[in-house]
Image (cartoon, rainbow, N blue to C red):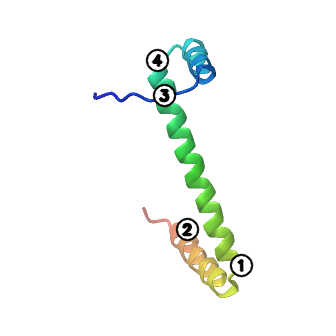
């Protein structure tokens, strides 16, 4: 795996080192997990914003609810 140099503050390096020791993993492992968690959080934030925008549009929201009902009835049909 190729590596890159990233500059961080001394305080962040100390925190990263401490987390690495506590979790029993490498500092790069801690960074990878932090990046994964932040990406997931951002995806959920954008998804929530999109649903909020959808709910502000009554016609679009009704269409969404109608589509959900269709999917729910398809899920209850007993077929896999």
Based on the displayed image, in which of its 4 quarters is residue 15 positioned? top right
Q: Residues within 10 Å of mark 2 (few under 14, many from 20)?
A: few
The residue wearing badge 3 is 7
Q: Position of residue 3 (x, y in %)?
A: 33, 27
Q: CA separation, marks 3 and 1?
A: 43 Å
The residue wearing badge 2 is 76
Mark 1 or mark 4, which is nearer the start of the sequence?
4
Relative to 77, is 33 above or below? above
Label 3 close to label 1 by CB (< 8 Å):
no
The residue wearing badge 1 is 56
The residue wearing badge 4 is 26
Q: Position of residue 56 (x, y in %)?
A: 71, 78
Relative to 20, is 44 above or below? below
Mark 2 vs mark 3: in front: 3
Q: Residues within 10 Å of mark 1 (few under 14, many from 20)?
A: few
In this rendering, would 36 be left or right of 54? left
Give me the residue at 50% from left, 39% from top.
36
Q: CA separation, marks 4 and 2?
A: 47 Å
Label 1 close to label 2 by CB (< 8 Å):
no
Relative to 76, is 67 above or below? below
Q: Secondary structure at mark 4?
A: loop
Mark 2 or mark 4, which is nearer the start of the sequence?
4
Q: Secondary structure at mark 1?
A: loop
Q: Secondary structure at mark 2?
A: loop
Mark 1 vs mark 2: in front: 1
Q: Residues within 10 Å of mark 4 (few under 14, many from 20)?
A: some
Mark 1 or mark 3, which is nearer the start of the sequence?
3
Give me the residue at 64% from left, 69% from top.
51
Label 3 close to label 4 by CB (< 8 Å):
no
Give me the residue at 61% from left, 68% from top.
50
Q: CA separation, marks 2 and 3?
A: 54 Å
Mark 3 vs mark 4: in front: 3
């Amino acid at each position: 795996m190729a590596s890159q140099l990233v500059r961080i503050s001394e305080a962040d390096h100390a925190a990263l080192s401490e987390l690495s020791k506590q979790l029993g993993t490498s500092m790069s492992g801690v960074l990878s997990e932090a990046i994964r968690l932040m990406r997931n959080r951002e995806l959920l934030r954008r998804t929530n914003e999109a649903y909020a925008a959808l709910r502000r549009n009554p016609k679009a929201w009704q269409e969404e609810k109608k589509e959900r009902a269709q999917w729910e009835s398809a899920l209850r049909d007993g077929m896999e």
